[in-house]
Amino acid sequence: MSAALIPDDVARRNRRSGILALSMALGMLAMGYAAVPLYKLFCQVTGFGGTTMMASEAQAASIKPTDKTIVVRFDSNVSSALPWRFKPENPTEKITIGARDMAAFNAENLSSQPVSGTATFNVTPTQAGKYFAKVQCFCFTEQTLQPGEKVRMPVIYYVDPAILTDPQTKDIEEITLSYTFYPLDPAKKGG
């Protein structure tokens, strides 16, 4: 014969189960909000998905150039919601692997009011992303252009010589660095 549960015991177990279920739901919600910044950080650290690496001046100075070259193609896009023109000065460059290089893009605000934008970027083929390092880039910060303003936006970068020893990347002859400018979200700017 089993002992019958006392009503207080049932209520206590139900309360505990409810609190556990609520805690799990709140935890899953928090993970949902944290997923995007954590994924972005993961991509920046590993180069996953064609995300380029960010390098300091000291890191860049420690890299030794090789006698090998690679072609870098520059791609530019602008969201239809951003009234800008944005193009690379040179669509391709042949660079020395390991040597710092600079590419420049030209942007122009086609509207009659100041407009702020931010650029996203990636590299293809995606497995080359972890070897493409940017030392300085307009994409690290938001950009504001005054009405009709034209600016030159440089990016200083290098391709890490380790690309030559990775079985997945050693035969790559061309890398494409692609940027897309989007209007800055006014909510993020405090406006």
Image: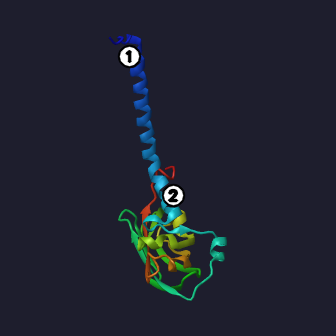
* Residue occupying image coordinates x 40% and y 36%: 25
Q: Quadrant of residue 84?
A: bottom left
6 or 75: nearer the viewer: 6
Image position, residue 115 (x, y; %):
47, 62
Disc 2 packing (10 Å; few <14; some 14–19; many ≥20): few
Q: Tell me the element at label 2.
A: helix
In this rendering, position of residue 30 left or right of residue 162 = left
Q: Specify the amino acid type for callout 1.
A: Val
Residue at the limit of the structure toward the front, as seen here: 1
Q: Which residue is mark 2?
A: 41
Mark 1 lies on residue: 10
Q: CA distance from mark 1 to mark 2?
A: 46 Å
> Foreground residue, 134 or 162?
162
| Percent x, y of residue 57 | 65, 72
**Mark 1 or mark 2, earlier in chain:** 1
Relative to 17, does residue 184 appear above or below in the rendering? below
Q: Does any portion of residue 159 appear in the rendered image?
A: no
Along the line of sight, the residue nearer the viewer: 155 or 9:
9
> Eyeballing the image, is 28 above or below 68?
above
Q: Quadrant of residue 102?
A: bottom right
Which quarter of the figure has residue 60? bottom right
- For the point 32% across and 11% down, the residue is 1
Q: Residue furthest bottom?
A: 67
Q: Which mark is residue 63?
A: none
What residue type is disc 2 on?
Leu
What percent of the width, then of the height, locates residue 96?
A: 55, 85
